[in-house]
Amino acid sequence: MDKNQKFLLGALSALLAGVAVGLLVAPKNGKETRELIKNKAGDLGGTAKDKYDKSLEELTALADKLKEGFNNNVNSVKEKAGSIAHNVSDKVHGVVNNNA
């Protein structure tokens, strides 16, 4: 883990700890506090899932583009190799026919 990742992980941990302490010492009764924690956790989970799904869609689209580009390049190389092989074959036949 590099410095930035460690810093972000530490900052996120401190933020979550602060929120948890704030909720636990809030002037609400236990039932209301637990309900609030449950709702916030559900919201956080939903947001994380939405971001995960969006990232997965973007990565899938990127992978498809990369695959398409790779296939196009492979086909182009195959065509060029076939053309070169044909030209070499013609030249070899011409040399063989001239020497025969």
Image: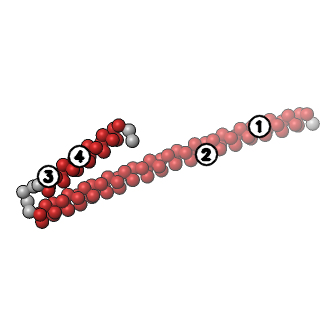
Identified by mark 3, the residue type is Gly
Lower position in the chain sequence, tag 1 or tag 4? 4
Residues at marks 2 and 3, CA–CA distance in whole angstroms = 61 Å
Residue at the spot of label 3? 22
Lower position in the chain sequence, tag 3 or tag 1? 3
Residues at marks 3 and 1, CA–CA distance in whole angstroms = 79 Å
Farthest residue to the bottom: give it.
Answer: 31
Residue 78, position in %: x, y? 65, 44
Q: Residue at x 42, y 50 (%)?
A: 59
Residue 41, position in %: x, y? 23, 58
Helix, strand or loop status at disc 3: helix
Residue at the spot of label 4? 14
Helix, strand or loop status at disc 2: helix
Callout in the foreground (2, 3): 3
Q: Residue at x 60, y 45 (%)?
A: 74
Residues at marks 4 and 3, CA–CA distance in whole angstroms = 12 Å
Which sits in the foreground, 38 or 46?
38
Helix, strand or loop status at disc 4: helix
Which sits in the foreground, 52 or 20?
20
Residue at the spot of label 2? 75
Identified by mark 1, the residue type is Val
Is residue 55 rendered to the left or right of residue 65?
A: left
Quadrant into which the C terminus falls: top right
Is residue 62 rendered to the left or right of residue 50?
A: right
Helix, strand or loop status at disc 1: helix
Is residue 26 rendered to the left or right of residue 94?
A: left
